[in-house]
Image (spheres, grey):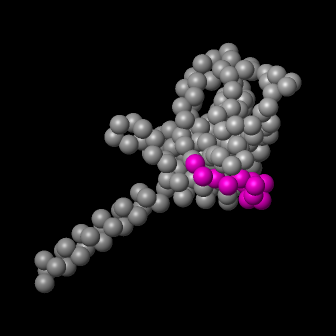
Amino acid sequence: MKFYLVIIMFFYVVGTASQTTNNDNAVAYLDNENKPVVNFVKAKEKVRKALGKRIDSLDIKDVGIYQVKTIGEKETDSYIIRYSDPKTNQRLAKYLFLYDGKFYFYEDVQKEWNLTIDEDNDAFFLSYYLIKGKTEDECLPNIAFMDGELYWITGTELVCAPDSPCKSEQILVM
């Protein structure tokens, strides 16, 4: 009888521990080969909760994590999550923080660890970047570093040409 009680307690403790670790706010993690694996449901749920009706026209069919190098005064590796709607050729991007093999939004880094990271870029970290182009492969989100601050840009040029087919907007969520 004691043996069964010990086994039941063991599975209870293991089950509770696994629920706790799965309950964090990470939207993705790195697998054994250091490739990002997205929790599609959680990532989509978080963006819908944050932006609501502002993105009703976006039918998210694909979510991916991309490593980009900032363009401008300083070249650094950064991670973004990109939501895509292939029907309307829209993409929505947000900056991600990689911590302990998991990817987090800035808001979650603040809540979970009470950290303030680079206050000069708070608005950038809290924003989403929405882009629409003529095809799925054009008008991809990127990040520029100028005067010590981060900015959303489209493609690899710091300034868009006046006749660019790309249309973009930054959505700030406080």
Residue at (85, 25) in percent of width and height: 163
Q: Nearer the viewer, residue 61 or 151?
A: 61
Q: Is residue 67 above or below residue 26?
A: above
Residue at (45, 46) in percent of width and height: 37
The residue at the far bottom in this view is 1
User: Is residue 9 inside the magenta stretch?
Assistant: no
Position of the N terminus, as image quadrant, is: bottom left
User: Is residue 54 inside the magenta stretch?
Assistant: yes
Q: Position of residue 125 (x, y in %)?
A: 67, 39
Q: Nearer the viewer, residue 118 or 39?
A: 39
Q: Position of residue 81 (x, y in %)?
A: 59, 42
The residue at the far top in this view is 73
Q: Position of residue 98 (x, y in %)?
A: 50, 38
The residue at the far right in this view is 162
Residue 21 appearing in the image: yes
Residue at (47, 60) in percent of width and height: 23
For the image shown, how many numbered marks are present on the structure?
0
Q: Position of residue 151 (x, y in %)?
A: 73, 29
Residue 150 appearing in the image: no
Magenta region: which residues? 51-62
Tell whether 83 sits left or right of 1.
right
Residue at (43, 58) in percent of width and height: 22
